[in-house]
Structures are given as structure tokens and as C-alpha cells.
Image (cartoon, helix red, strand yellow):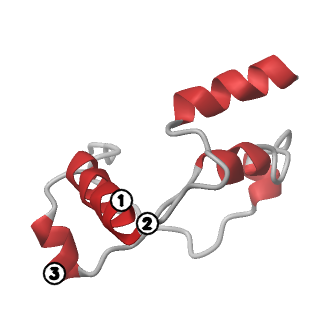
Amino acid sequence: MKKKSSADKVCEPITEYDLDLLLPQGIQGKYVERYRMGTNLVLLEPDVAAAFPDQESVNKALRLVMQLSGITVRDKAPRNRQSVRRTQHATG
């Protein structure tokens, strides 16, 4: 008689995981400051998202709106994650 292979076994997801067992060395919120500094996400409505194929076109359109509206930037934030990482490494 053959033993069941792992492909024959039914894998059912666990409804709840104990993170203390999975990640005993884990530190909650370890990267939260880095995340807050480098994240600026906006959820677009489907009709707006369909008009812009990529982030470059969205940024270009928003810069044009800023220019035409006379909106000025007060505090220039880093433009991408690379500059955020460089800033963090330089400051400690």
C-alpha cells in the first residue's frame, strides 16, 4: 500500500496564526518610521486610474495642475524611496 504524497494531502489554511510562534524574534513596528517617511499613496477612482497608464503621467498631470493653480510646495519631501534611504543613513 502506498503512502500519500504531499501532493495528495489537502492543505487547509489556518484561520489564525500565532505570530509569537512564527516570529519569536520579531519586533513590532520596526520599520514604521521608514514606512511613514517614504510612503505617499493615493487611491484613485477607477475612471481616473484608467486615464493614467503609469505614475509618471499622474505626476506630470498633477504638476501641471499645481502650476496652473498657483500651488507652491512648502516643504519638499523626498521624491522616492532611494532618497529616503540616503537621508536615513546619513542621519543615523
Q: Position of residue 49 (x, y in %)?
A: 20, 70
Q: Residue at x 27, y 45 (%)?
A: 1
In the rendered structure, the answer to whether residue 66 lies left or right of residue 35 reads left
Rendered position, 16 above or below 61: below
Q: Position of residue 6 (x, y in %)?
A: 35, 45
Q: Residues within 10 Å of mark 3 (few under 14, many from 20)?
A: few
Q: How many marks?
A: 3
**Tag 2: residue type?**
Gly
**Tag 1: residue type?**
Gln
Q: Given contact means CB atoms under 8 Å apart, are the residues at marks 3 and 2 in contact?
A: no
Secondary structure of residue under mark 1: helix
In the rendered structure, the answer to whether residue 9 lies left or right of residue 26 reads left
Q: Position of residue 84 (x, y in %)?
A: 64, 33
Residue linked to disc 3: 47
Residue 45 image-quadrant placement: bottom left
Question: Residue pushed farthest top?
Answer: 90
Secondary structure of residue under mark 3: helix
Residue linked to disc 2: 70
In the rendered structure, the answer to whether residue 66 lies left or right of residue 77 reads left
Q: Earlier in the sequence, mark 3 or mark 2?
A: 3
- Answer whether residue 9 is visible to the viewer in this image: no
Residue 46 image-quadrant placement: bottom left
Q: Residue at x 20, y 76 (%)?
A: 48
Residue linked to disc 1: 67
Rendered position, 30 above or below 46: above
**Between marks 3 and 2, how big is the CA–CA gap?**
26 Å
**Between marks 1 and 3, how big is the CA–CA gap?**
23 Å
